[in-house]
Image: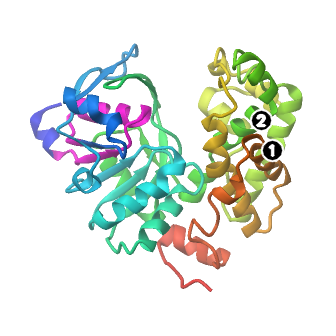
Amino acid sequence: MDVHHRKELPKFAVLGAGNGGTAMAGHLSLLGCDVSLYNRSREKIQAIQGCGGIDIITDNDSCPSGFAPLKTVTGNMEEAIKDRRILMVVVPAFGHKDIAVRMAPFLTDGQIVVLNPGRTGGALEVLNAIRTEGCTADVIICEAQTLLYACRSMNPAQTKIFGIKNSVPIAAIPAHRTPEVVNLLRLALPQFAPGDNVIKTSLDNIGAIFHPAVTVLNAARIECTQGNFDYYTEGITPAVALILEKLDQERVNVAEALGFRAMSAREWLYIAYNAAGRSLFEAIRNNRGYDGIKAPKSVYHRYITEDVPMSLVPIASLGQFSNIPTPTIDAIIHLASVLHQTDYLAAGRSVESMGLKGMTLKQVHQYILDGIMIEQR
């Protein structure tokens, strides 16, 4: 990349120094971007501060590798996002609201906040949170449908990137500003593609279908084997797949009631992995990309702790909002809550936390598509 083009690249802040955050910060640095890295816990970034950057390793020829220098690595939010055009939030979804509250006092006109990913309702919750905190800056809040990377932190200042997805949909609130965001992001990350809107990216969250229910329904096997079985090809039997199909249909029904089309899990498997089948079970069994992926070693895993409150609960809440019953989703939320002795329904995202309570369906559309906020009843 030549020096002239490098000067045109936007300045990034990466908020979160876990697996995805370190991969993204390192990748952007290797691409020639000016990147700052923030983490709430200073202990997690001490090694990166000491080294002056992150060592990115990979076995994939299409991924960059090498030492990625980072001039600003900090636990101070104001320092991290000052004069940064794009703020890439890469934390678990249950941390989105906390990040929003922390950055709200320091946001300025023209900044773009991207959740990587938003799970279900992430962009809506973050926008509602920063406005509740009194932030009036003209910022664009966006969410990616999924994380760009398959990656893992190997050491405190070393991260391995296994792969980078070819295409990741992203959507902004309001939806008409999505092209503006995508055009800017593509100066560094051409993998981002325009999504329809944040309801579409939120309800196309296939992890909501494949993660919580499979973990809950395989709880005994996980505890007995410490996860020593193939999660998808052994954990999803014909009986489990029938339950997943019901979960999936409820998700699609909620999207339809809101006026949007969500792809089914079978469609997603075909698009993502070229895996086809007459049933969801057949499609999963025909997906070679799932071969050898082991189950979690414990039922106390993000497939429940993150995906239930931040994926299933908001789908159920949106179902209630749109008068669509979600009995199978409700059952998995209940079983996960019993399993973890946690009220995930109370702890999860809701229509209220997403800022939609009191709106009519028409008002929700105006808000999401055009950014028009109608005073709530």
- Residue found at the far right of this picture: 239
Residue occupying the point 35% across, 35% down: 44
Left or right: where 287 falls relative to 17: right
The answer to whether mark 1 and mark 2 are in CB contact below 8 A is yes
Judging depth in this view, the residue of 226 and 60 nearest the camera is 226
Callout 1 secondary element: helix
The percent coordinates of residue 187 (x first, y second) are 28, 43
Quarter-of-image position of residue 326: bottom right
Specify the label residue 216 is tagged with: 2
Q: Is residue 171 visible?
A: no
Q: Is residue 93 magenta?
A: no
Where does the N terminus fall, quadrant-wise? top left
Left or right: where 278 falls relative to 28: right
**Of marks 1 and 2, which one's residue comes earlier in the chain?**
2
The percent coordinates of residue 72 (x first, y second) are 20, 42
- Residue found at the far left of this picture: 3
The percent coordinates of residue 123 (x first, y second) are 50, 58
Q: CA distance from mark 1 to mark 2?
A: 7 Å
Q: Where does the magenta region start and end? A: 8-35
Residue occupying the point 33% across, 47% down: 185
Q: Name the residue type under label 1.
A: Leu
Residue 111 vs 287, above or below: the answer is below
Judging depth in this view, the residue of 277 and 333 nearest the camera is 333
Instruction: Identify the residue position indicated by label 1 in the image.
Output: 335
